[in-house]
Image: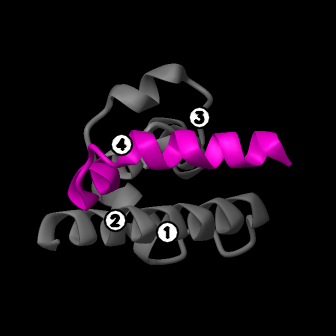
Amino acid sequence: MKYVALLGAIIIGFTQGFTSKSVLLIIFVLWTIPLNYFRTKFRMIVYETSDWKIALRPIFWKEIKALVGNIYPKNLSYIRMRNFYRFYLIIFFILYLIWRYI
């Protein structure tokens, strides 16, 4: 129990020097870290390749169509990854808007 109180005191003391915008920026940066992994995984399904160079390619229309539409309706791994990637990007966008307008 005393460790929980100590941890709470450390967190409160650590965040007192930060503004709410700084804390949101830290959360935004932490949320950004796995973005490349999820995007690469999604692109590997969309372009049907396992080549690592897919992460270096710029955005293409097929990727946007796959994100907004349904290009492989019978592929369950595509549908799961697409829905998860949509959710991830929506949270990413909401965090950005909160950080930008607070």
Q: Secondary structure at mark 4?
A: helix
Which is closer to the viewer, label 1 or label 3? 1
Look at the image and tell me in which quarter the C terminus lies.
Answer: bottom left
Which residue appears at 45% of the width and 37% of the height?
Answer: 33
* 58 versus 20 height, above or below: above
Q: Nearer the viewer, residue 88 or 41?
A: 88
- The reply to whether the C-beta atoms of the residues labelled 4 and 3 are less than 8 Å apart is no
- For mark 3, what is the residue? 49
- Could you give the CA–CA distance between mark 2 and mark 4, rounded to whole angstroms? 10 Å
Q: Secondary structure at mark 2?
A: helix
Count residues near mark 2 (Cα–Cα under 10 Å), then give few for <14, some for 14-19, many for 20+: some
- For mark 2, what is the residue? 95
Kind of residue sitting beneath label 3: Thr
- For mark 4, what is the residue? 29
Per the rendered image, the range of residues in magenta is 1-25
- For mark 1, what is the residue? 86
Which residue appears at 35% of the width and 42% of the height?
Answer: 29
